Amino acid sequence: MADIPAYRPRVTSARPEMTRALSARTGLDDEVLRDLVHAFYGKVRKDPVLGPIFAARISDWEPHLGRMVDFWSSVALMTGRYHGAPVPAHVGLPVTRADFDRWLTLFRETARETCTPDGAEHVITRAERIARSLHMAVEDAQRVCPHAVPELR
Ligand code: HEM
């Protein structure tokens, strides 16, 4: 029988190194992101406009908060911890541009309270970009029919 070569390809990921570098540059880590997410949704839940939209859809907040910490860990630190699909979760929501503006106002405020200045700018830039694309997806769906969900391929 032929010898099996001793060579084994080494599959390494650049991700842990990128996460370390991003964390060092921004001061963001699991604990800060957890504080950000919990403080932010604390404000969202008390908000007279956004609060009822969430309350109608989320009864058990712990899984949502955990998912959002994973989401921000993936977005801000590239850890790959989030595996969900944000677009289908938002198309069909009864929201307008004003609601996204309010969401971003609360997010910017909370980020500046819980993160370093560099960390706050890092997450705010990404939140603004994602809010813009979610808003476009929502508007797109509303143009067809107020409750239509676009076919996602
Ligand atoms: C008007 C603004 C927004 C409202 C009212 C809103 C509302 C919601 C609601 C109700 C859910 C739960 C859906 C469900 O579990 O059935 C959700 C999930 C989520 N939202 Fe938002 N959202 C808003 C903006 C944003 C923005 C700007 C981001 C990102 C920067 C975001 C990221 C997410 C993510 C990652 C999830 C979890 C999706 C999943 O994996 O299931 N949301 N949102």
Image (tube, rainbow, N blue to C red):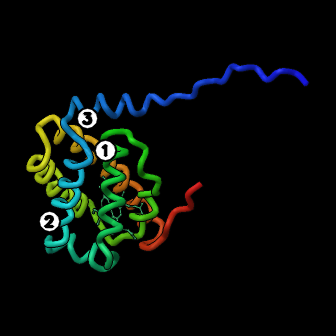
Q: Which residue is mark 3?
A: 23
Instruction: Residue at 22%, 40% (x, y): give it.
Output: 28
Spot occupied by residue 43 in the image (x, y as percentages of width and height): 14, 65
94 or 68, which is in the foreground?
68
Quarter of the image holding residue 91? bottom left
- Nearer-N-terminus badge (2/1): 2
Instruction: Residue at 26%, 35% (x, y): give it.
Output: 23
Spot occupied by residue 145 in the image (x, y as percentages of width and height): 46, 71
Instruction: Residue at 43%, 44% (x, y): give it.
Output: 80
Q: Which amino acid type corresponds to the residue marked 2 in the rendered image?
A: Lys
Distance of label 2 from label 3 (alpha carbons):
25 Å
- Quarter holding the N terminus is top right
Distance of label 3 from label 1 (alpha carbons):
20 Å
Q: Which amino acid type corresponds to the residue marked 3 in the rendered image?
A: Ser
- Nearer-N-terminus badge (2/3): 3
**In the image, is residue 135 above or below residue 143?**
above
Spot occupied by residue 82 in the image (x, y as percentages of width and height): 42, 51
Assess whether mark 3 and mark 2 are in contact (beta carbons under 8 angstroms).
no
Distance of label 2 from label 1 (alpha carbons):
21 Å
Instruction: Residue at 16%, 66% (x, y): give it.
Output: 42
Spot occupied by residue 41 in the image (x, y as percentages of width and height): 21, 64
Which one is in front in this view, the residue at disc 2 or the one at disc 3? 3
Q: Which residue is mark 2?
A: 43
Q: Secondary structure at mark 1?
A: helix
In the image, taking residue 74 as reference, residue 22 lies left or right, namely: left
Quarter of the image holding residue 19? top left
Which one is in front in this view, the residue at disc 2 or the one at disc 1? 2
- Give the mark count: 3
Q: Which residue is mark 1?
A: 129
- Quarter holding the C terminus is bottom right
Which one is in front in this view, the residue at disc 3 or the one at disc 1? 3
